[in-house]
Amino acid sequence: MGTTQLDSVPEPKYWHLKTVLGEALDSDFAVGEILPNERDLAARFGVARATLRQALEQLELEGRLQRRRGVGTTVAPPRMGVDVSTTEHTWPGAGEDAWRTVDCTMVVPPPAVARLLDTDTGEETYTVRRLRVTHGQSVAAELLYIPASSVPELSAIDAPSGPARARAVLRELQRLDLEGQDRAVELGSARVDDAKELERLPGAPVLVVTTRYFTEGRTAAVSVATYRADTCRLTFGDSGDLEISHHNEERRAS
Amino acid sequence: MGTTQLDSVPEPKYWHLKTVLGEALDSDFAVGEILPNERDLAARFGVARATLRQALEQLELEGRLQRRRGVGTTVAPPRMGVDVSTTEHTWPGAGEDAWRTVDCTMVVPPPAVARLLDTDTGEETYTVRRLRVTHGQSVAAELLYIPASSVPELSAIDAPSGPARARAVLRELQRLDLEGQDRAVELGSARVDDAKELERLPGAPVLVVTTRYFTEGRTAAVSVATYRADTCRLTFGDSGDLEISHHNEERRAS
DNA sequence: TAGTGGTCTAGACCACGGT
DNA sequence: CCGTGGTCTAGACCACTAA
């Protein structure tokens, strides 16, 4: 008889639903296929729509579903691997990387960034906006903060904004010796401006990659890049094409 | 009068709530302090409890709050930096790293892992369970999959499980030449067993770090480590002690 | 036992995308 | 215009923790 799992800890409905739906996605649906709408699905499973939505939210968080208002819920393709390795010791914008430079403004960086830059809080920095596009999709939005002291040659010119200015700042950066960089990844939620660039709703889960660029023993620039957490897998190294599934298999001892 | 924000796109209540609460956290609360309970807060802001909860969920996702059933909602400390840099070319378990080895079982790896290992689907592998503890907190749970072919010396022994067995497998691994490793990070939700180890509810957001260990041109082992996304910031490099805030400041052009 | 957060319901209305 | 997902409500009960 073996100790058959006592239902001493009954599984929440949405959790069970998520499992069932996940299995259905594996067996009965193709990538891109649209699911029945939420009201129908809820009725079919005999739960309230809010409960069904809780399950769908989890599956979306795991990158298995994509939901768009006014359209419907579709089966998401596997996450794409996005290389964020730090091996190449280059400044941002060097060579032709995957980033599209959008514009440049003078901005007072958030306190946390100011702390990294070791500038006075309230001091403005050049702030370059860039977008990372891969396979025709916007996967990340970045803000690059560069204190004026890092690019002294630029201080004379007056018009401190616009795409041309952005490229000028990047060009000026590359004249410095890049001594190193370090990187951190954490979970965040998309600010309204990032959300718009990434074609997501505000608050959507994102992976925030913070990079410090060092030169002459100090921090010359700080980049805060927000990657779509639903569609991206960040890779460090030469494994951009490996495929990680999103299944939630339980451990099965032999 | 300046162009006062037309409410052409009215902000959702929960989003506005999140902003207000976030500011209150900065100014009026200390780390560890407990907030009023959800029913009181909802009443105070004149919204339904579900709406308030949506705001709290976002703040928790950003690592600013911690909620525990039966206890209350507290202000979370800043996320801790956890080093996951790949620079040290060592096998897992070498030296004294931050991992605590728990046990070892024979498990059929999930298909995605089997694909990385290039084993037959359905083939069992040694599976070592480890826990990463930092500052007295469990921050990550790992499953290390090692095909029997990677540690041929072990195949004779019979008892294939237990902590002693786990250490034996790791010891055997370190006799191999580690030629390289690569790493990927993506968002996931905690499986029930990981959730228990991490003292979180099932489905809690986690950062999944997948590492491949190479030897002799093939993949000798694959590690799948799930880190608590609420309390951890993964660092790559020597920046373990830098502090990134979780604020959602908007860009303010000068 | 009292109080907390977690789950669930059955409605309602809104914002958006396509027809 | 209709159908979709997104937001919101006002309840209810459950699971957990601590006194």
Image (cartoon, coloured by chain):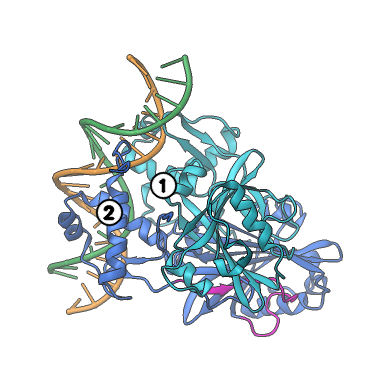
Chain colours: A blue, B cyan, C orange, D green
- Above or below for B175 versus C1: below
Count of numbered circles on the image: 2
Q: Which residues are magenta?
A: A79-97
* Three-letter amino acid code of the residue under disc 2: Leu
Label 1 environment density (alpha carbons within 10 Å; few <14, some 14–19, many ≥20) = some
Q: Chain of mark 1?
A: B
Residue at (34, 43) in percent of width and height: B51
Find disc 2 in the rendering and name its residue.
A17
- Above or below for A42 versus B42: below
Residue B114 in percent (x, y) is at: 48, 70
Front in this rendered view, residue B88 or B250:
B88
The reply to whether the magenta stretch includes residue A6 is no
Residue at (72, 63) in percent of width and height: B90
Residue B101 in percent (x, y) is at: 61, 48
Q: Secondary structure at mark 2?
A: helix
Residue at (60, 61) in percent of width and height: B154
- Above or below for B172 versus B47: below
The reply to whether the magenta stretch includes residue A80 is yes
Which label is found at residue A142? none
Left or right side of A205 for B225: right
Q: Chain of mark 2?
A: A
Residue at (30, 65) in percent of width and height: A69
Which label is found at residue B202? 1
| Residue contact between numbered discs 2 and 1, judged by CB atoms under 8 Å | no
In the image, are marks 2 and 1 on the same chain?
no
Magenta highlight: main SS: loop
Front in this rendered view, residue A86 or A165:
A86
